[in-house]
Image (cartoon, rainbow, N blue to C red):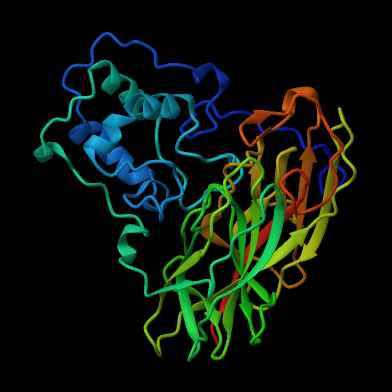
């Protein structure tokens, strides 16, 4: 795969001390037996790690609100799926973090060391003991937990039932008009029928009709709540509303009415943030991807301006994509997903913002792999034979997109 300057984009070496889900293949498989698992317990060893690394929006108590398939908020809930949790953690599949640790330091990266991962295997070998709640030492609260209840919960004005056996795009109008300029501190899309919803684009709508405007947020498979750093917020102007671009995929599924919601955490009326957040779309055209081929594509988009800082990247592609990378025009790595996973499309927010000069640009690169060994599983069925894939928004089409989150000083 060729980089922005024509150089070869080779996968970065695996760090010697692997601490996240980019764990090497040698770590895959069932938990390794350990000679002594005595003294280990859920309250003392496992609960603090789950609290710190398993997002409330992924594994919270409410099935309609969480993105994950089950809750991990109590001892009983965790024990019920204890073997699955242990295997997923030891394999590196969980917590999900496809982003390379060698690119740049991200704000919300999971912090499980290999020793901590092995605690899950030891806990399973000990029979999943609970221990005493007095043993539990709570980790520092993350930004999600500090938010409390949403300031507003908006939903599509009317439920919509998508057609069976189809990819459908539908504009869902939110019947709410913002009565004043509103600064959004955090946002979360809550699909009503998660099995049917492929993605949701939240657009700021300046009209009374259902139409697309500035894209403020996207929910994708594996998506979770997006929380901006202290002092940052996105702006919705007085008189504007939201339109939701809904993409439904109903192949092999039972259709049901969907009324997707958007949760907002806003600043108090009259309060302004230090910086206003927006995002720039870096979109590359996708070539025709024939069976057996491994093509790539790239594009460069300006992002600089007075006082602009890049605060994060949200890569997006579909099932044949293999490697997504974004770089600043001076070669600075912004995001590097070396083993793209359609099920985990995350927002990667930087631990420290990156100042960019006027005239700066971002290059987004995507490499695809349409060989027999890299065929996707679609609706639970492994594709046995490669097909020709072209650009499009359907599940079996392809895209190459990097949303670049930027902030500017508030006026």
Question: Which corner quadrant holds the C terminus?
Answer: bottom right
Residue in the picture at 39% in, 88% down: 269
Q: Quadrant of the N terminus?
A: top right
Point out residue 170 in the picture as x, y percentages from the top left corner.
67, 65
Nearest to the observer: residue 273 or residue 392: 392
Q: Which quadrant of the view contains residue 378?
A: top right
Q: Residue at x 56, y 54 (%)?
A: 347
Question: What is the x, y in percent for residue 296?
Answer: 84, 42
- Extreme top residue here? 35
The foreground one among 198 and 125 is 198
The image shows residue 61 at horizontal and vertical percentages of 31, 49
Tally of numbered discs: 0
Is residue 196 positioned above or below 18 on the image?
Answer: below
Q: Relative to the observer, which residue lies in front, 31 or 373? A: 373
On the rendered structure, is 264 left or right of 78?
right
Which residue is located at x 89 percent, y 46 percent? 287
The correct choice, above or below, for 114 with respect to 256 in the image is above
Q: Is 327 on the left-hand or right-hand side of 28?
A: right
Q: Toward which corner of the image does residue 30 lie, by quadrant?
A: top left
Q: For this rendering, which residue is in front, 335 or 255?
A: 255
* Image position, residue 229 (x, y; %): 45, 65
In the shown orientation, is residue 261 left or right of residue 360? left
């Amino acid at each position: 795969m060729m980089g922005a300057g024509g150089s070869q984009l080779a996968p970065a070496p695996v760090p010697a001390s692997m601490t996240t889900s980019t764990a090497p293949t040698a770590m895959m498989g069932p938990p390794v037996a350990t000679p002594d698992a005595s003294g280990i317990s859920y309250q003392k060893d496992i609960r603090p790690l789950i609290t710190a690394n398993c997002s409330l929006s992924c594994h919270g108590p409410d099935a309609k609100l969480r993105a994950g398939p089950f809750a991990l908020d109590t001892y009983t809930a965790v024990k019920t799926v204890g073997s699955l949790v242990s295997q997923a953690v030891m394999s590196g599949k969980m917590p999900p973090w496809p982003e390379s640790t060698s690119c740049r330091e991200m704000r919300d990266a999971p912090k499980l060391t290999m020793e901590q991962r092995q605690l899950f295997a030891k806990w399973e070998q000990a029979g999943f003991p609970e221990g005493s709640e007095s043993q539990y030492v709570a980790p520092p609260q993350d930004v999600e937990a500090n938010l409390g209840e949403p300031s507003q919960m908006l939903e599509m004005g009317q439920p919509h039932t998508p057609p069976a056996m189809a990819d459908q795009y539908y504009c869902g109008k939110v019947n709410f008009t913002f009565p004043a300029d509103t600064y959004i501190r955090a946002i979360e899309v809550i699909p009503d029928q998660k099995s049917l919803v492929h993605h949701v684009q939240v657009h700021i709508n300046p009209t009374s009709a259902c139409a697309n405007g500035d894209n403020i947020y996207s929910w994708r498979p594996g998506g979770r709540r997006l929380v901006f750093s202290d002092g940052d917020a996105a702006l919705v102007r007085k008189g504007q509303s939201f339109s939701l671009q809904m993409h439904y995929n109903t192949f092999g599924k039972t259709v049901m009415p969907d009324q997707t919601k958007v949760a907002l955490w806003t600043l108090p009326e009259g309060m302004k943030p230090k910086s206003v957040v927006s995002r720039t779309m870096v979109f590359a055209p996708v070539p025709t991807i024939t069976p057996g081929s491994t093509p790539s594509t790239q594009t460069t988009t300006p992002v600089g301006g007075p006082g602009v800082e890049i605060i994060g990247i949200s890569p997006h592609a579909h099932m044949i994509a293999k490697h997504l990378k974004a770089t600043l025009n001076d070669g600075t790595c912004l995001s590097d997903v070396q083993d793209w996973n359609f099920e985990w499309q995350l927002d990667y927010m930087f631990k420290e913002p990156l100042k960019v000069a006027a005239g700066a640009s971002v290059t987004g690169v995507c490499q695809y792999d349409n060989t027999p060994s890299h065929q996707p599983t679609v609706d639970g069925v492994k594709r046995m034979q490669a097909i020709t894939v072209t650009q499009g928004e359907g599940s079996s089409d392809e895209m190459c997109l990097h949303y670049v989150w930027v902030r500017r000083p508030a006026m």
